[in-house]
């Protein structure tokens, strides 16, 4: 054997895939090595950044006699400022890009470079990355500094900003390629990247206002523009509103958390030059000198009196705790929004409205109050004088972000359908109120009845009792965050042991109780219908029809039979109790359930309407003198008889063979079992699909991403040869006494550029899997999943408003109206196209019906069904529908 052959065999052996289960560390190290080889530019930038910071520090320690690490010969060449740049020392800006002041900033810089440049190098060529870095660095830094000068030149903060030496850090280098890479991402991740990046930059800019924040904002815009040019697409192609409510929850929750940390950013800033710095300091460990503000109002200068005053003293630990707990409360509210709680959105709106009211008090009422206290009848502060001194301008800037957040919350309020139980809301309010009043009353009585010294404006005074006004001011300062009302250095507080203990405890205790109440409001067991939903989850596993699993979805209310063995899911719109299919649970009770549910609705002055019921229940209702209409056609496949032979199956066979030739495989899983990457791709596919429609996604009996999360729901998705998810379907189980006897197709999405026939491939593979899972099939593949064994039917679900036929002479006109409605909606949703697609699988047709007791309320019923399917429909959506219909007519 030659030496060359030996080396070749060794190389082949070295590349043999590792068994990650047996050698997880080795597999992880190999993954890291592969990543390093694919990202040389990222690693080079990290090494250069570390090298500069290490060498500068070594040189400083050796030559500067332990002087500040950035000082060389009296000159600060590794930090920049406006003065240095004005004197032609432009190289300080370049130096300060690679140098940072503290060790924690070095660690943070390495993490940020690895993440941002790693993303950029994954999706962009190195030439594009280099070009983007140069362009965004030059334009971002120069334009950002110019903007900072433009906005801050006439403020009192400019005196500090112009001479302050700053370390810019590597952010301005990497922001451009990072934002440019967003154009190559899926719509889901592109939206997340843009929103969260701009949110972080905006919070820094508004609450801190340093020159680098302006540069980062401009650099982000320039980088995003470069990305648009790289992928050669129009900007409008990237404006994609989240189709799924859960995505809106996640985005707004994270934005709320980011903006909630603004006061912390403001407190840690050395200059407080951001437009929201002042309002941020009200919630931070800072104190404004309102006495100086009042004196400023008597001056002749036309400047913003409020921007001049910063932190002058810290307060006691209890007030620090109150400020910290206020930030915790904001994060809890953000958590509630992230989980889709409507109560959390309501509180967020109220919180931001309170910030605006706080700004009114801060900028207009308190200066007048302080001026009166200090100058008595000599006070000459008026609204006009405050406006002239900058109050109105400062108020408008300060209130801008809370106002914008209120608008965003209000516009997306309809997406938050998870409601907290009213009893728990009232109980929580009572607990907070009783705690506040009780602790305040206890402190008041203690202060009034306890003699001893207390502090007033720094002097020790002996007093038998504290006055009511003194107690009120003392209480107020304990409940509010540090910055607000801490100007009252005249605040009294007792020195006696027990009153002083209460003085330090009441504020944190009330905030802790409020936070605990918030957690209970946003928890799972606090949601309206949580217990009923759990009971319905158990009943649906005992029995139901092919679409009964839809009764477990969010938004449904439940009626339970007297025995608790069966139930009916319904939604009330416009006085119509619209059911989601028929009864489920014990089949022996179904017929009686129809009668009892009707009586239940009559007691509540609702008209019961059974929607999407099958022939047997329709017949039972017609025996009760009800009317009914055909509203769709369900397609049923018997997997035990599945085969694809014959001319009628040509399209399905072609789809299967084409997928196999291209290396496409199907994967059966659940949403929880799928990897994070697969989940993200599924959400991205759904958003891309929804963005192509003229109307928002339909709800009610048509599920979306939110309905995939149930661990009982199966996902069957297609993965191409590159490992990318290109199409996905979801399947809802049908149970009989705890055993799965059928699967119903629900969610069906694919990428816009997916190969033709990909959905036929997935449906055929599901049928093959169920056929192979039959016990009497000797050629079937063995499966360990009991839910895939001996399944009796495979439903392709009902195609709404398609294939419908009049049931009799009396139903002809309503049926014709439904047919006309289906024709109008066809350009937007393609109901008839869906029907013909499902007919490719040679299914058995089973019609579904809507049954109602009073034909005179059909218009009301039509509106209720429309609202159920399109609860989020807006005037803009109606216009889009009209445009789609017009476009379809022009094409014809």
Image (cartoon, grey):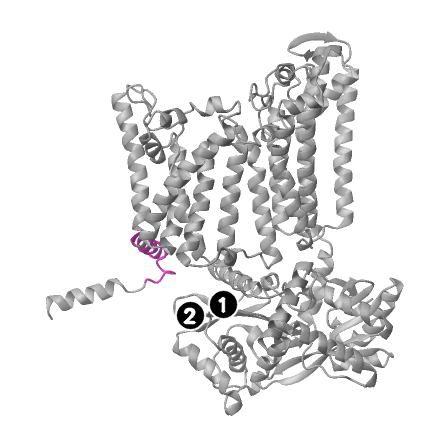
Q: Label for residue 720?
A: 2
Relative horizontal placement of residue 732, taking residue 365 as reference (left or right): left
Magenta span: 18-37
- Compared to residue 783, the image places residue 209 above or below, namely above
SS type, badge 1 = loop
- Compared to residue 276, the image places residue 450 above or below, namely above
Q: At 60% across and 48% down in the image, what residue appears?
A: 252
Q: Quadrant of the C terminus?
A: bottom right
- Compared to residue 472, the image places residue 333 above or below, namely below
Q: Main secondary structure of the magenta part?
A: helix
Q: At 53% across and 22% down in the image, what residue appears?
A: 156
Residue 814 rendering spot, x and y as whole percentages: 79, 78
Relative horizontal placement of residue 795, taking residue 726 as reference (left or right): right
Say whether residue 809 is visible. yes
Residue 179 rendering spot, x and y as whole percentages: 44, 49
Residue reaching furthest bottom? 646
Relative horizontal placement of residue 517, taking residue 640 as reference (left or right): right
* 10 Å crowding of disc 2: few (<14), some (14-19), many (20+): some
Query: In the figure, residue 290 lies in which quadrant?
Result: top right
SS type, badge 2 = loop
Q: At 29% across and 40% down in the image, what residue appears?
A: 48
Mark toward the start of the polypeptide (1 vs 2): 2
Q: Label for residue 751?
A: 1
Say whether residue 453 is visible. no
* 10 Å crowding of disc 1: few (<14), some (14-19), many (20+): some
Residue 223 rendering spot, x and y as whole percentages: 42, 47
Residue 476 rendering spot, x and y as whole percentages: 71, 24
């Amino acid at each position: 054997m030659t030496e060359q052959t030996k080396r070749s065999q060794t190389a082949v052996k070295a590349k043999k895939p590792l068994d990650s289960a047996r050698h997880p560390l080795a597999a992880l190290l190999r993954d890291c090595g592969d990543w390093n080889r694919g990202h040389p530019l990222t690693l080079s930038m990290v090494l250069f950044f570390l090298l500069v910071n290490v060498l500068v520090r070594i040189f400083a320690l050796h030559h500067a006699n332990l002087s500040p690490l950035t000082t060389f010969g009296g000159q600060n060449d590794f930090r920049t400022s406006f003065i240095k740049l004005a004197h032609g020392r432009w190289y300080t800006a370049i130096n300060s890009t690679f140098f940072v002041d503290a060790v924690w900033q070095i660690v943070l810089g390495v993490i940020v470079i690895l993440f941002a440049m790693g993303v950029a190098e994954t999706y962009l060529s190195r030439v594009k990355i280099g070009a983007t870095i140069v362009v965004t660095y030059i334009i971002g830094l120069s334009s950002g500094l110019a903007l900072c000068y433009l906005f801050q030149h006439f403020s009192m903060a400019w005196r500090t900003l112009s001479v302050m030496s700053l370390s810019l850090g590597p952010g301005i280098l990497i922001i451009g390629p990072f934002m440019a890479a967003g154009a190559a991402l899926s719509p889901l991740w592109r939206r997340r990247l843009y929103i969260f990046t701009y949110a972080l930059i905006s919070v820094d800019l508004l609450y801190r206002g340093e020159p680098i924040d302006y540069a980062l904002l401009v650099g982000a815009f320039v980088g995003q523009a470069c990305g648009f040019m790289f992928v050669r697409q129009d900007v409008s192609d990237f404006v994609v509103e989240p189709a799924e409510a859960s995505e809106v929850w996640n985005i707004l929750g994270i934005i709320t958390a980011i903006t909630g940390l603004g006061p912390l950013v403001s407190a840690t800033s050395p200059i407080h030059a951001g437009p929201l710095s002042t309002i941020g300091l009200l919630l931070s460990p800072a104190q404004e000198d309102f006495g100086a503000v009042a004196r400023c109002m008597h001056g002749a200068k036309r400047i913003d009196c409020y921007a001049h005053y910063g932190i002058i003293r810290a307060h006691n630990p209890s007030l620090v705790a109150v400020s910290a707990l206020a930030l915790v409360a904001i994060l809890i509210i953000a958590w509630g929004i992230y989980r889709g709680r409507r109560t959390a959105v309501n509180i967020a709106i109220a919180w931001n409205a309170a910030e605006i009211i706080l700004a009114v008090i801060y900028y207009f009422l308190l200066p007048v109050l302080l001026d009166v206290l200090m100058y008595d009848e000599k006070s000459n502060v008026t609204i006009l004088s405050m406006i002239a001194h900058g109050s109105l301008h400062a108020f408008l800037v300060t209130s801008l972000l809370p106002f914008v957040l209120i608008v965003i919350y209000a516009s997306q309020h309809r997406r938050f359908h998870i409601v907290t139980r009213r009893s728990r809301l009232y109980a929580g309010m009572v607990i907070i109120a009783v705690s506040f009043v009780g602790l305040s009353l206890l402190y008041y009585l203690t202060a009034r009845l306890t003699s001893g010294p207390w502090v007033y404006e720094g002097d020790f005074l002996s007093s038998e009792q504290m006055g009511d006004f003194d107690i009120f001011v003392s209480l107020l300062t304990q409940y509010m965050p540090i910055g607000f009302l801490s100007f009252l250095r005249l605040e009294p507080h007792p020195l006696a042991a027990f009153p002083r203990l209460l003085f330090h405890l009441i504020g944190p205790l009330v905030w802790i109780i409020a936070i605990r109440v918030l957690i209970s409001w946003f928890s799972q067991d606090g949601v309206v219908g949580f217990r009923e939903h759990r009971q319905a989850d158990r009943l649906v596993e005992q029995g139901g029809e092919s679409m009964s699993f839809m009764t477990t979805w969010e938004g449904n209310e439940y009626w339970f039979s007297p025995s608790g063995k069966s139930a009916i899911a319904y939604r009330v719109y416009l006085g119509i109790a619209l059911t989601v299919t028929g009864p489920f649970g014990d089949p022996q009770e179904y017929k009686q359930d129809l009668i009892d549910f009707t009586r239940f609705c009559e007691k509540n002055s609702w008209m019961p309407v059974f929607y999407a019921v099958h022939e047997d229940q329709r017949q039972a209702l017609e025996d009760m003198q009800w009317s009914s209409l055909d509203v769709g056609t369900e397609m049923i496949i018997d997997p035990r008889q599945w085969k694809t032979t014959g001319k009628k199956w040509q399209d399905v066979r072609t789809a299967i063979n084409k997928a196999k030739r291209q290396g496409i495989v199907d994967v059966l899983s659940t949403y929880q079992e799928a990897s994070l990457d697969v989940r993200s791709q599924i959400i991205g596919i759904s958003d891309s699909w929804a963005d192509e429609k003229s109307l928002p996604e339909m709800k009610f009996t048509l599920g979306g991403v939110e309905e995939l999360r149930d661990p009982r729901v199966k996902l069957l998705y297609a993965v191409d040869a590159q490992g990318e998810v290109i199409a996905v379907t979801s399947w809802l189980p049908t149970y009989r006494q705890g055993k799965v006897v059928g699967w119903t197709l629900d969610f069906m999405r694919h990428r816009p550029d997916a190969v033709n026939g990909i959905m036929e491939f997935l449906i055929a593979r599901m049928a093959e899997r169920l056929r192979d899972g039959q016990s009497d099939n000797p050629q079937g593949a063995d499966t360990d999943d009991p839910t895939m064994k001996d399944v009796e039917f495979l439903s392709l679900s009902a195609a709404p408003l398609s294939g419908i036929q009049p049931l009799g002479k009396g139903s002809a006109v309503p049926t014709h109206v439904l047919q006309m409605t289906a024709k109008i909606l066809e350009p937007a949703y393609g109901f008839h196209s869906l029907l013909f697609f499902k007919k490719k699988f040679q299914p058995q047709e089973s019609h579904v019906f809507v049954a109602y007791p009073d034909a005179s309320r059909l218009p009301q019923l039509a509106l209720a069904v429309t609202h159920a399917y399109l609860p989020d429909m807006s005037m803009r959506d109606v216009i889009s529908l009209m445009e789609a219909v017009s476009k379809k007519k022009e094409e014809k």
